[in-house]
Every structure is written in structure tokens, then in C-alpha cells.
Amino acid sequence: MSNSFKRGCNCYRGRRSRWIEPSILYLLWEKSRHGYDLMNDLPELGFFSEQADPGAIYRTLRHLEDNGLVVSEWDTSGSGPAKRFYTITELGKDNLLRWQETIRLQKNALDAFLEKIKVIDRKPKI
Amino acid sequence: MSNSFKRGCNCYRGRRSRWIEPSILYLLWEKSRHGYDLMNDLPELGFFSEQADPGAIYRTLRHLEDNGLVVSEWDTSGSGPAKRFYTITELGKDNLLRWQETIRLQKNALDAFLEKIKVIDRKPKI
DNA sequence: ACTTATATATGTTTTTAACATATATAAGTT
DNA sequence: AACTTATATATGTTAAAAACATATATAAGT
């Protein structure tokens, strides 16, 4: 027996799920923001326990912009280094809406699964 | 603009989520089965839209067995090729229970997210 | 001059999912 | 007997994503 299960659950093996795309789209739908803001705001959506990975955020933003779901412009006002100000497009909004069905299906599956496994009795530990 | 978003949503980009491990554990908790049975039974849990990938199933079973969460024995009764009969262990049951919290957190995040995005209005198409 | 906070970006490695293929047994078909 | 199909397990290969690490730059505070 290898030891990857010995301590704790290893549920997810430390990985989060891939909801970063709709999460960013949603936050930009709420209001336009800088990429850096997303690092602070993403965890509140509940998909990222700790700090969101900057690498993931900026690469996702690039991907979204490459596909016309968001647009950006440099913002040199204010202090500190230049910021990129991201705004969702109509295509982006439309895309966000399309996520609803995927998310609903996933949620329903998780709901049903929770119902099923809640009847399992945990043996009392010695 | 690249074209990966042009048609449809690309939600998930064709990928399913990684609930195969607790799904298999649950099915084996219900009753011991052959790996081949899991191909038919897994889709009913709602995480896999179509046919589950045999490669994923057998590799996951190996992984679970390597870690003591399931045990197996060859079953040469019946017709056709020999089958491996899988049974969940106490450690496996315990592990399945530990998934509950992970699944609940994910479900709650999806729930909250659905609530948020449901207020977005879809523009009427021309 | 040094450190810290802000801000964006890229490089590398590991893991996972997706897809493809291989192997073998036995039953049914021509 | 040869061929096809269903059953059953397993491995190989590729592509994508996550995780982790590092690079670069501006400006404010000490």
C-alpha cells in the first residue's frame, strides 16, 4: 500500500475545481476590475479556499480576452505600477449565462450524491 | 480572437469533474461489483453524461486498491473472460465519509454562485 | 539604500482527462 | 472451421489544466 491516503482524506488531492472562468466573468459582470483585484475577490465565491493563484488569473484573463469575452485597457492613473482594467463584453455575459446549465447539473449531481452517502455510518473509532 | 468560444458555451471544455473516486467507492459500498459493472453504473450518479471511460475506471480501481480502500479477487465463475470482483474496505468506507465535507463545500459554492448569476438578464436575440 | 506593497507576467513540473489501442474469453453466426 | 460480437480488463499516448516557482517593474515607506 502506498501512502497517499494514510493521512486525511486526500479528497481532491489538493486541487480545486475549474470554476475560475465563470467566477472571473461573474466578478467582471458585477463590476469592471483589475486583475489584481480578482486575487482578493475570487476566494469569496467559495471555489478557492486560500489565495487564488496569480498565474491562473492572468492566464485565464488572457484566454478570455483572446476569445472576446472580456476587454482590457491599461490604467496608469493612481500610484504604483500600471494596471489592466478588465471589462466583460456582451459575448462574455452571454457565455456566463451559458455556464448556468453546467453548474446546475453539477450541483444537482452533488446534491443527489450527498443524499446517498449520508446514510453511511461511520464506525466509532477505538 | 481564436475560435474556441465561437460555438456554444465551452463550459468545461468537454471535461467532466473528478468525482470518479468517491463515485466508485459509493457504488462499491452499495454492493461489491466488477469493474465492468461500474461502466454501466457510474453514469447514473450524474457525473458522467455518457459512457464512463474504462481507462479511468480501471486505473482508479488500481489506485484505490494500492491504497487499501478496496480489495479485489478474480472471479472465474460464469462465462466470458475472468472478472475482478471489487469490495470496499473499512478504510475505503472511512474515506468515502471524508469526501462528504469536500462535496458539501463544493455544492454550497455552486449553490451560492447559481443564486448570484440568476439575476443576470439575457439580452433577447435578434 | 533597503524593504514592502502593488501589479502583471511567464516558466516549469506534475497531475488529470481524453482518446486510442491491445489482449483475452466465450458465445453466436455463416 | 472461420468470423463476428459481447464481455472484460488493461495499457499507451496526447493534450490540457493545476500547482508551483520565478521574473519584472513601479512606487511608497523606513
Image (cartoon, coloured by chain):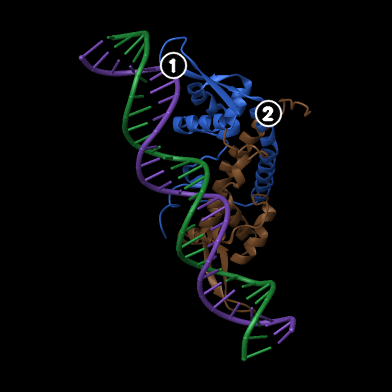
Chain colours: A blue, B brown, C purple, D green
Above/below status of B89 relative to C14: below
| Residue sitting at x 55%, y 29% | A65
Q: Is residue A123 visible?
A: no
Circle 2 marks a residue in which chain? B
Residue B121 at what x, y percent from top left? 74, 25
Image quadrant in which you'd find residue B11: top right
Left or right position of A74 against D28: right
| Residue sitting at x 63%, y 21% | A30
Same chain shared by disc 1 and disc 2: no
Front residue of B54 and B41:
B54
Cα distance, mark 1 to mark 2?
A: 30 Å
Which kind of residue does numbered mark 2 sit on?
Answer: Ile
Circle 1 marks a residue in which chain? A
| Residue sitting at x 49%, y 30% | A57
Q: Residues within 10 Å of mark 1 (few under 14, many from 20)?
A: few
Above/below status of C28 relative to A27: below
| Residue sitting at x 44%, y 16% | A82
Quadrant position of the N terminus of chain A in the picture? bottom left
Residue on which the image places disc 1:
A82
Picture disc at residue B117? 2
Picture disc at residue A122? none
Disc 2 secondary structure class:
helix
Q: Residues within 10 Å of mark 2 (few under 14, many from 20)?
A: some
Left or right position of A96 against B121: left
Image quadrant in which you'd find residue B80: bottom right
Q: Tags 1 and 2 in contact by the CB under 8 Å rule?
A: no
Residue B115 at what x, y percent from top left? 69, 29
Front residue of D19 and A71:
A71
Residue D1 at what x, y percent from top left? 62, 91
Q: Is residue A76 visible?
A: yes
Which kind of residue does numbered mark 1 sit on?
Answer: Ala
Left or right position of A57 against D8: left
